[in-house]
Image: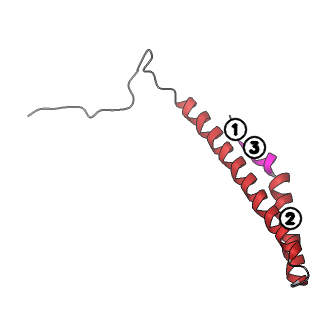
Amino acid sequence: MELSCPPTEDRLVVGEEAPEPWRDDVVGMRRDLYRQVIARTIGAIVASVSLIANFFLIPVYPFWALTIIVVDALVIWALAAHGGELRDSQEY
């Protein structure tokens, strides 16, 4: 009967092969922050295009177009004003 120990992750590694778990966390957080910035930017661009397009629809659908213009303006404001709160909430 042969006894063997299962491999564990609790071993000490010295030198260039030493893992840096904190580095993966920092890189991951920065990547997530970058993705959030890209998402907010794309959201603001889409809302801006919608806002401009609805100016052309005011003569045809005045109430609906003005409602969408207000909603688009609120979306752009929310994406621009509260982006810093997301950045500040990230812990490095």
Amino acid on which disc 2 is placed: Leu
Position in image of residue 40 (x %, y %): 74, 53
Tell me, what colour scheme is on the image?
Answer: secondary structure
The residue that label 1 is drawn on is: 91
Q: Check the image and name the residue furthest to the left.
A: 1
Q: Earlier in the sequence, mark 2 or mark 3?
A: 2
The residue that label 3 is drawn on is: 87
- Above-or-below relation of 28 to 17: below
Q: Depth check: 54 or 21 in front?
A: 54
Amino acid on which disc 3 is placed: Arg
> What is the spatial separation of the Cα atoms under label 2 and label 1, in whole angstroms?
28 Å
Assign the C terminus to one quadrant of the image.
Answer: top right
Which type of secondary structure does the marked residue at label 2 adopt?
A: helix
Answer whether labels 2 and 1 touch (C-beta < 8 Å). no
Q: Quadrant of residue 66?
A: bottom right
Amino acid on which disc 1 is placed: Glu
Q: Depth check: 24 or 8 in front?
A: 24
Position in image of residue 58 (x %, y %): 90, 79
Q: Which residues are magenta?
A: 83-92
From the viewer's perspective, is the residue at label 2 or at label 1 nearer? 2
Using residue 8 as the reference point, say whether residue 91 is left or right of it. Answer: right
The residue that label 2 is drawn on is: 74
